[in-house]
Image (cartoon, grey):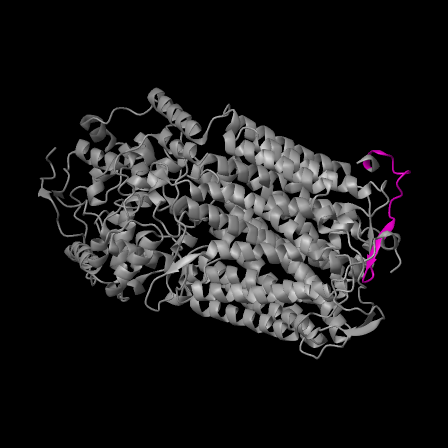
Amino acid sequence: MKANKTSETSEAADQVIHEVDGIQEYDNKLPNWWLYTFYGAIAFGVGYWYWYESAQIGASPAQSYQAELDQAAAAQASEITVGEATPEALAALAKDPSAVALGKQVFTSTCAACHRNDGGGSVGPNLTDEFWLHGGAPEKIFRTIASGVPDKGMPAWQPQLGALKTQAVTAYVLGLKGTNVAGGKVPQGERESVSSR
Amino acid sequence: MTSAAKTSDPPVEPIARSQASEPTTIAYEDQTPMRFVAASAVWGIVGMLVGVIVALQLAWAPANIHATLGFGRLRPLHTNAVIFAFVGNMIFAGIYHSTQRLVKARTASDLLSKIHFWGWQLIIVAAAVTLPLGMTQGKEYAELEWPIDLAITAVWVVFAINFFWTLARRTEKHLYVAIWFYIATIVTVAILHVVNSLAIPVLGGTLKSYSVYGGAQDALVQWWYGHNAVAFFLTTPVLGIMYYYLPKAAGRPVYSYRLSIIHFWALIFIYIWAGPHHLLNTALPDWAQTLGMIFSLMLWAPSWGGMLNGLLTLRGGWSKLREEPVLKFFAAGVTFYGMATFEGPLLSIKSVSSLAHYTDWIIGHVHAGALGWNGFMAAGMFYWLVPALSGRPLYSKRLADAHFWLGTVGILLYIVAMWVSGVNQGMMWRATNPDGSLMYPTFVETLIAIKPMYWMRLIGGSMYLVGMLMMTYNLARTGLWSKVVETRVKVVPLAPAPEVPWKDVIFSRPIVLTIVVLGLGGAGMAANMFAGPLFFAIAFFVALFGMVAFQHARKAGGPPFHRILEGRALLFTVLSALAVLAGGVAEIVPALVVKPVEAANAKPYSPLEVEGRDVFIAEGCYTCHSQMIRPMRFETVRYGDPSTLEESAFDHPFQWGSKRTGPDLAREGGKYPNLWHYRHMVDPRAITPGSNMPPYAHLENERLDLARTGDKMRALSKVGVPYTEAQMAAAETNAREQGRAIAEDLAKEGAHVEPDTQMVAVIAYLQRLGKPPAEKKDVGEGVSMQEGAK
């Protein structure tokens, strides 16, 4: 590569060295910035391989995932804005218009697909009658939403929605109880009177 | 023809068997290139029209008007038509036309040319019929079923014979850089196609077959193929075409011969390693992912070498660019190539991929390449070639100009829409609230947010299609269908003469050096993978620059090394095949020979689930739904634990997917009741307002041929799924039983479906996904397989 190092004067640019079918070829030197890009990428590749694969100094995907989980767990532990989902707290939330409004929003985007917009039920059960498959008390409704009923196809929502929205949607569902909307799904589960807790 | 290099070259060899060295006159065979141009233009319109239709379907679901014309079936038709019909015919046109002129010989056999042309068109027609019917192997860009795969192999062999036979009869000793790229293309595509398409057909006269590879192995082989189809079908032949037509049209010398040597060898050697960048952050062993990433980064400069040689050849010719549409298309095409080959390495960085993978950013990236590079290089070549072959000036330069601007604006609208959509959706998927919950827990919210971009893409794509129509009209008026003007040239057959012995070429210093250092690298890698890539990189670097150094070291007075190599077609072919094989062997062989230990715990699908999986593949569900949860918290909160290798061990072919227009399905099983799936497939928008999924109500009426399920299981057992004789014999009974249970469950909820329908089978399959991951597994456990693969 001596030719490359010498200045342009010693190696004349734009000299035709071959010709075929009327196409001529120059043999100009390689642009330096291009060469450095190439060297740089090779050097980076070697370094990256050494760091992550040979010496394993860098975190593996499994390790970084674990770190991410730990961090999230720590963050959740320190999160104190959402109170415990006690029956009393849930009953209070059901009377809090802002919580119910948030719950309605979540219900429409997340729950309506199976329980219908008005809670009358389609794939999932009717939430507006007096019959409950997994219990109609506030803490039971909360548990069903938060942890799901995997055997029946009800997903666990708390990991995705977070505690606040899960409680809010519980508050909204508590308000649906006993509204007995028209055209709702046939009753399923056990009868519980509306006033019962 | 009296350049200095020529006179200093050694006397030539007797490859052309002729003993005479008096000048003779030959006529080029130009009807074949003209036919290929016409076919490319017509199929290009078809392929892009299907593209516009699928773009409309994504923006507006009611456009899925019929089962055979749904998105899942049309999308493979679109990709296959554009890649293999549009670009395929274009590269054949360029190769058949330019090779004759570059080697100064008529194409060896008119008959083989005809077989190649018509054979290829028949294959395209077969693809256009079978894909909408749902006959597919379910591997992206390799969907065609086994009889068509065999036909492709046969036609490709005919092409190769015709091409190399022409080289053997050449009267121009040295192979020009365009020919190097053609050689690499023909050899590599053959290897890729054969290895990736290996499959076992289901006995009994069906078209159905199962890939011999499963799970992670299939993922690796498929993306080794898929990525290098881009490399060796959409890139290298088009670079060869650039090296012929661009200097021709510009009337300017090629900027740098030595740059062409370096970027050619670097490109073909490095490209083949980059496939795993399609599988970053998946369950694929990490070492393979890392190789895919670092080789993709190394690919940046070699790719730009091609762009530089193209753009710098236009130096001093910029004024011509204003009035010559051909050069406009070439300049823009090469620029888009530069853009796409910068974006490619960027997307191959693991952290960038974690955002961009599965999103529209990737769609934008491939269209920058397909529309900008392939489409514009094709247009430039056609606008030059059709006047040259028909002997008539281009019908309308203004129309070509309008095509250029319409196409350019169309591409920009398209890729900007996809950038915005991809980055936007990727950010929404990963957005979390302070308490760790998802900001957009419902997948469809993230789809609704990008819908406007889908309309913008549709507009951009439609503009490009209109440009194609304008081009075809322009070419037709010029003389696309007319008889070609015969070109006769005087050639001097190569005289028999002493040759540098092949051993001296093979054992020349650059090659010995390369092989020694690569060997050391390979040994190092096999030993503990500590030094391996280090040596590979050094070897590579030494070899490349050694080649140029030897090229310029003329102390001995002999011709430079690479010039000798250019005179030896066979040696050149062998060496380029070796350069290509190195990466494939290093990445794929370890994955194939290491018995996947994790398969020990995996349980094969039940007979009905096998049927359901076939429906899933036939409907092209994998074009929108991945089955691969990446180890990132925002994914696992949404979809469940990270996918393991074990879970897809018996998936022939693998279904990890490449795009999420809908949510990941790896752990769909048990998430919703059967009724949910039933209602959702009959009318997706009834369950998920805003969804763009096509309706699959027709699955309710399609009966399964359960008598054949045993045959399917037998084919699967041949590729390694451990079904027992008893299981295969009882397939039908077992499937009916499972189907009845699902139908009864649906009936309880008021939905009446026959138990032996495709609907029931696909529900059975979906309910199985991600189940059972019998015991809950520790996160670190996925790593143990990687140790094994080392």
Give the farthest residue toward the right.
A9
B698 sits to left or right of B386: left
What is the quadrant of the N terminus of chain B in the image?
A: bottom right
At a point 47% along the width and 35% down the height, the residue shown is B286
User: Vertical placement of B69 versus A146: above or below?
Assistant: below
**Which region shows up in magenta?**
A4-23
User: Vertical placement of B177 versus A1: above or below?
Assistant: below
At a point 82% along the width and 42% down the height, the residue shown is B552
User: Vertical placement of A128 versus A39: above or below?
Assistant: below
> What x and y, as percent, mark residue B565?
74, 51
Q: Main structural element of the magenta stretch: helix, strand or loop?
A: loop
The mark tally for this picture is 0
Observer-nearest residue: B596 or B657? Answer: B596
Question: Quadrant location of residue B44?
Answer: bottom right
Give the farthest residue toward the top.
A78
B680 sits to left or right of B403: left
> What x and y, as percent, mark residue B334?
70, 52
> What x and y, as percent, mark residue A154?
24, 42
Residue B403 visible in the snapshot: no
> What x and y, as percent, mark residue A115?
24, 47
At a point 39% along the width and 64% down the height, the residue shown is B134
Does residue B598 belong to the magenta stretch? Answer: no
B624 sits to left or right of A117: right
Observer-nearest residue: B64 or B28? Answer: B28
User: Vertical placement of B784 versus B599: above or below?
Assistant: above
